[in-house]
Image: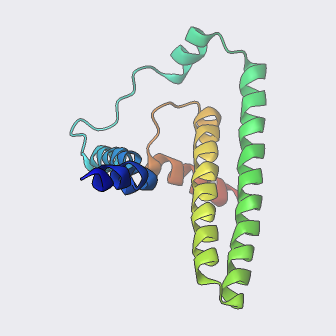
Amino acid sequence: MKNRHFLRRFLDIPTWMGAGQLAEGAKTIRSMISDIVRVNQRGPQVIQTFDEAVERYQYTDEYLQARQRFLLLTTRLYLFCLALSLMYAFHLLNKGLIMACFTTSCVSLILMSFAFRAHFWYTQIKCKKLGMTLYDWFQSLFEKANEQF
């Protein structure tokens, strides 16, 4: 009987595995997925217009221009890092390092999401419109491309 308590104290495998942290992580992932999947019936809600937000936060035109330049630069930096990451992933795939390629591809997806977020914010400032949808963002991209032709 004494041996069993001795072993239980020194061989606490669930604590070594971090079972509590794994369970909390699973709960967090489950709640994130339910938030993503849940459909909002009312559609996007714009609480205030762009002009109202500019007035509320007392932004100047110079500040907005600087912020717009910063977001465009950030987008380009993320896209450059994304290109490097994808080239490295293909190199790893060529070498037969599948798991390393998978990990690098995950990093590439994260960089792509950062680039999208920065460009989405840039587009909102450029179009002076809050509450843009993904469709509005796509439209603004193709309007710019159509203006060049």
| Image quadrant occupied by the C terminus | bottom right
- The percent position of residue 46, horizontal first and vertical second, equals 39, 27
Q: Nearer the viewer, residue 88 or 49?
A: 88
- Give the x, y percent position of residue 47: 39, 21
Q: Is residue 98 visible?
A: yes
Q: Judge left or right: residue 16 versus residue 51.
A: left
**Percent x, y of residue 101:** 63, 77
Toward the left, the furthest residue is 41
For the residue pair 124 and 91, the one nearer the viewer reads as: 91
Apparent side of residue 11 relative to residue 78 in the rendered image (left or right): left
Report if residue 149 is visible in the image: no
Query: What x and y, as percent, mark residue 38?
Result: 24, 45
In the rendered image of this protein, does residue 3 appear above or below residue 55? below
Residue under the point 67% across and 15% down: 59
**Above/below status of 42 relative to 19:** above
Q: Quadrant of residue 20?
A: top left
Looking at the image, the residue that sits furthest to the front is 2
Of residues 41 and 36, the one drawn nearer to the viewer in this rendering: 36
Residue sitting at x 63%, y 46%? 119
Near-viewer residue (26 or 15): 15
Residue in the picture at 65% in, 59% down: 145
Colour pattern: rainbow
Q: Residue at x 35, y 44 (%)?
A: 24
Q: Is residue 86 left or right of residue 40?
A: right
